[in-house]
Amino acid sequence: MEEKEEEHQPDHPLTCTSCHARKEKEAESSEKATKLKNRLLYYLFLVALTAVETGVILLCALTVLKFKTPTFRVRAVAVEALRVTNTSNPFFSIAFKAEFNVRNKNFGHFSYENSTVYFYFEDVKIGKAFIHKAQVDARSTRKFYIRVKLTSSYVSKSSLLFIQDLKSGVLPISMQSKLRGRITLLKLLKNDRSTNLNCNMDVIIKKRQLKNLKCK
């Protein structure tokens, strides 16, 4: 008997349509998730950038664009001449050179007008000095010198305080002034400001020196 050869068909993997569809859906979902993640990162970046810009603007508003009152001070005083009589006709005459500073902490320049420094002894005006108008650059200090001569001509010679001060060898002198000006930022923002000078010092007669210089 002839043996019949069994026909064997080669084994081929069965194609799974549903598997392909599932893979496509998974790939599509993964792509959407990636796009959503990138979009969220983009929005987070925009929020962070906006917060940084807001912080920079606030910092500029609180520092650069904030107007600050300049300071006006006496830094040093040197006696150049001193004459005192402590007799029946008490009298003093003082000539000195003073260094004044105007400090501007603003990010714009400060322009001030002409002014006057008044000197007092026991609340009596004994002299004055003229200050010329000028400009102080941004974040800088302007230094200038003034020579002045003070006399007790307007002080009552019968004043007990005057006589006591002469006998003690110490003459209390005070200075007062006001600078009026304008601060200009970025050539657009302007603000009118005034700064006061209020300083006290003691003249030591024997040593011909000034001590205890203090400004408020």
Image (spheres, rainbow, N blue to C red):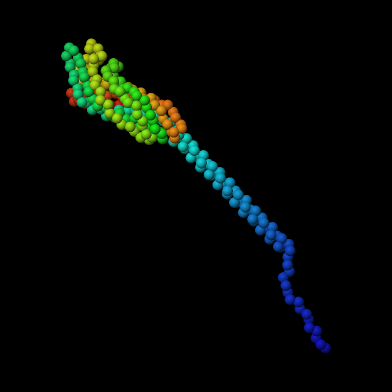
- Residue 191 point in image, percent of width and height: 44, 28
The residue at the far top in this view is: 158
Q: Determine whether 5 is above or below 216 in the image.
A: below
The residue under the point 73% across, 65% down is: 16
User: In this image, 142 relative to 3: left or right?
Assistant: left
The residue at the far bottom in this view is: 1
Q: Determine whether 58 is above or below 165 in the image.
A: below
User: In this image, 22 relative to 150: left or right?
Assistant: right
The image quadrant of residue 180 is top left
The residue at the far right in this view is: 1
Quadrant location, the C terminus: top left
The reply to whether residue 15 is visible in this rendering is yes
The residue under the point 73% across, 69% down is: 14
- Residue 178 point in image, percent of width and height: 35, 23
User: In this image, 40 relative to 156: left or right?
Assistant: right
Quadrant location, the N terminus: bottom right
Q: Determine whether 145 is above or below 37 in the image.
A: above
The residue under the point 27% across, 21% down is: 173
- Residue 147 point in image, percent of width and height: 25, 25
User: In this image, 212 relative to 108: left or right?
Assistant: left
Judging depth in this view, the residue of 150 and 174 nearest the camera is: 150
The reply to whether residue 216 is visible in this rendering is no
Looking at the rendered structure, the number of numbered marks drawn on it comes to 0
- Residue 9 point in image, percent of width and height: 76, 77
The image quadrant of residue 31 is bottom right
